[in-house]
């Protein structure tokens, strides 16, 4: 199933996207939608029953899709987590996940602009599978990791490479406003996070194309490892790393400019599309 958060001019609402449109959860016993519910099979079964019986009552073209998580408590990112990305940097495969953070305030919606900051010259793209936590998780065993996951979405880990390299660490370069577009849906159920196609296009030209089977540390590894380091809470986001093809390591580099259109796509979730605009 694909849960969506959307607005049509009023308060954010929740629904389930189907082939025929969006089945709204507004006014049903199935809203609101705390992330804990998405780890509960009984709740998911009730949603499936609703979808079978109800007609899609919202046209996706008439609403604005919103980030599935509006204000996560934390966004934990994983560096160098695809074999092909390590190869393009001529880096050894890490022995354990390399963690860094993005500021939660960098999250923005599908369709909203990525703002190219003044004074930054090297703005880059990174398509990533994002894991949304549904239950408080601490010292989780790898074999139990999926029980703590609410669902999966697309995150574009936009990066100011010059800030990143100048600082010698990631936080500033990853945390400018609008540098974490997220969406368009939250996939649950039979979605396979460790075997799905990922791609990114700039102005219609494919720049990244891979599969999460290229993970060095898969989703189960990451939930277990990170929950040993810190407590993961409902709504926290783990961004699982990007495949090869990022702009900074191309020869010559191919970085984002105002006027570009960026489309990050993950099979089974959808396409997250955002324009790039200059800072005003």
Image: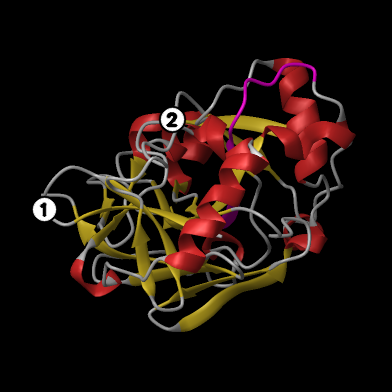
Q: Give the Cα separation between the discs numbered 2 and 1.
A: 23 Å
| Front-lying residue, 13 or 265 | 13
For residue 9, which numbered disc appears in the image?
1
Name which quarter of the figure residue 263 lies in: bottom left
Q: Position of residue 186 (x, y in %)?
A: 51, 53
Quarter of the image with the N terminus in it: bottom right
Residue 137 within the magenta-colored segment of the rendering: yes
Tell me what residue is drawn at x 30 percent, y 39 percent.
177
Q: Is residue 151 magenta?
A: no
Left or right: 166, with 229 as reference point: left
Which of labels 2 and 1 is toward the front? 1
Quarter-of-image position of residue 193: bottom right
For the point 31% across and 71% down, the residue is 260
Q: In the picture shown, does residue 224 fall above or below 266?
A: above
Q: What residue is at 42 percent from the left and 31 percent from the top?
A: 172
- For residue 72, which numbered disc appears in the image? 2
Q: Secondary structure at mark 2?
A: loop
Q: Mark 2–mark 1 contact, CB under 8 Å?
A: no
The span picked out in magenta is: 125-139
* In-image side of 83 versus 70 (left or right): right
* Quarter assignment of residue 107: top left
């Amino acid at each position: 199933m694909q849960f969506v958060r959307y607005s049509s001019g009023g308060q954010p609402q929740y629904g389930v996207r189907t082939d025929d449109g969006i089945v709204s959860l507004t006014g049903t016993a199935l809203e609101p939608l705390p992330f804990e519910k998405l780890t509960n099979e009984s709740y998911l079964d009730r949603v499936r029953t609703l979808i079978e019986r109800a007609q899609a009552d919202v046209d996706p073209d008439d609403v604005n899709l919103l980030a599935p998580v509006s204000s996560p408590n934390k966004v934990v990112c994983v560096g160098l987590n695809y074999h092909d990305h390590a190869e393009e940097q001529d880096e050894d495969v890490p022995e354990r996940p390399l963690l860094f953070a993005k500021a939660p305030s960098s999250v923005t919606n599908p369709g909203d602009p990525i703002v190219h900051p003044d004074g930054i010259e090297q703005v880059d793209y990174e398509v990533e599978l994002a894991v949304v936590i549904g239950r408080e998780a601490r010292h989780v065993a790898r074999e139990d990791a999926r029980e703590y996951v609410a669902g999966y979405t697309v995150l574009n880990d936009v990066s100011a490479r010059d800030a990143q390299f100048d600082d010698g660490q990631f936080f500033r370069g990853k945390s400018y406003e609008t540098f974490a577009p997220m969406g368009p849906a939250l996939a649950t159920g039979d979605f396979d996070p460790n075997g799905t196609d990922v791609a990114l296009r700039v102005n219609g030209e494919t720049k990244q194309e891979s599969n999460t089977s290229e993970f060095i540390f898969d989703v189960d590894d990451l939930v277990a490892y990170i929950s040993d380091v810190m407590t993961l809470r409902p709504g926290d986001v783990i961004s699982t790393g990007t495949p090869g093809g990022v702009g900074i390591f191309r020869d010559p580099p191919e970085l984002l400019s105002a006027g570009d259109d960026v489309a990050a796509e993950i099979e089974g979730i959808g396409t997250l599309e955002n324009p790039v605009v200059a800072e005003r």
